[in-house]
Amino acid sequence: MQLGSSISVHIKESDSDPEKEEDEVSPEVDDDVVEADRGRIPGEGGPKCHDFVNIPFTFSLATGRNVETHGLVGNTFHDKALNDSYVYKDSEKNMQPQWFTQNGNEPILLTNQRHGGKTGMIYWPGSEARYNDTIQYVSFGLYSNAPTLRFRVDRIMEWITQPDVNFCMLYFNQPDSAGHKYEPDSKEVLDAIELTNDGIAYLLQRIEQADFQGEKPNVIVTSDHGMNAVSYKRVVNQLLKRSTKDLKATSHKKEKIPESYHYKNNPRIAPIVVIADLGWMIQTIPYTNTLNGMYGYNHLESDMHPFIVTAGPDIRQIGLVDRFYQVDVYPLVCMLRGLDKPNKIDGEARWVATFLKQLPSLADIERFDRCAKGLDPNATNMGKRGNEMTPLCLALLALLHHIFQHM
């Protein structure tokens, strides 16, 4: 079952832009986005990397980097170099930048500000950290589940309608919390989905009613993971003390983890990684029957795939998209915002350029992707292409560019 969602609202140039992420939201949100009649890109957000838990995956959305690159490798993990451990529920840890700045991480909120914008943040993982010893953006403070989604939307709208704030990100914990407690197909999750849909509809209503200096914002709704039911009726206790032959899981030595997981090349990753089979869960504490939904399984399982929906004046109406990697949200926001100097990322503009109503030039796309790979964006020597655009890719983009210009 697909759960999870995130909304991004942003205004081009002098306008403003809220991005909101919820831990989980259902595809029923499509109806509200369609009613906005601004164009949409609904699609299955297939994770490019293994989405073990929500904190790493959400940080991939913000940074455009795979988990092994950004280094936030779990909700909890140990860093030998720091001789310290990160715990996602520890507010003090979440204010410490060392957990979020490995390998030169720069979340999109800081990329926006580096280009002269100002960002507003509500509860996005990593937004409480003191980058460069300070909070350089508007923050709602330490995480809490208490504020309703409508309350959070009101705060976003207060910011986005101001002339200095042009981009916002908002995280909401439903229906993820209900999915964990009651299982993803439960009535309680459906109720949480309705609550979330109400909040999204309220956001769109507020946008329609607000007086913006320029055109209205673009919105991105996406999720950080899917979810699958687990059952306390099939508990296998003390399994490791007896035998591992019936273990409902797959274990990998770190160096043997498949490259497609993008979860091996980081010193914070444990030497042995065990991934439970779909529908099973491994715990080191007694089971209390209060956890009936879980994620973190093989990222190729369709139940683990989140989704993405976009809408706005700068989004092309193109219907369904088969795949959309979470690391490509960063370049999509960059291109919508006109941020032409991205941080070094794993996402690529070439995969999202055709989603824009006003297509960038092929030269701009290649320049962006070169910069995003840490290469000289203005280099003219294309003899060694490596990960750069192939002639076939350029030809296909040129064809799409021609088609869209005449639609």
Image (tube, rainbow, N blue to C red):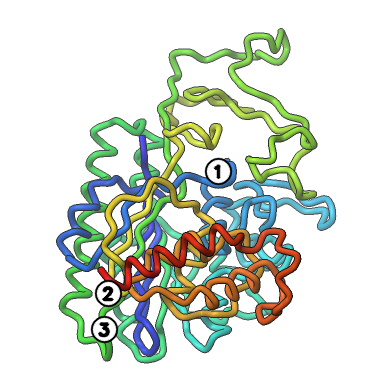
Circle 1: residue type? Asp
Q: What is the C-alpha distance between the residues marked 1 and 3?
A: 35 Å
> Does residue 195 appear anywhere in the picture?
yes
Which structural element holds mark 1?
Answer: loop
Which structural element holds mark 3?
Answer: loop
Residue 215 has which mark? 3
Residue 125 placement (x, y as % from top left) = 53, 60
Asked if labels 2 and 1 touch by Cβ distance under 8 angstroms, the answer is no
Quadrant containing the C terminus in the rendered view: bottom left
Q: What is the C-alpha distance between the residues marked 1 and 2?
A: 31 Å
Report crowding for label 2: few under 14, some 14 to 19, many 20 or more residues within 10 A (C-alpha): some
Residue 163 or residue 121, whichever sits in front: 163
Residue 313 has which mark? 2
> Does residue 285 appear anywhere in the picture?
no
N-terminal-most mark, 1 or 2: 1
Which structural element holds mark 2?
Answer: loop
Circle 3: residue type? Glu
Query: Which residue is drawn at the image coordinates 51% and 59% (left, top)?
Result: 328
N-terminal-most mark, 1 or 3: 1
Residue 58 or residue 151, whichever sits in front: 58
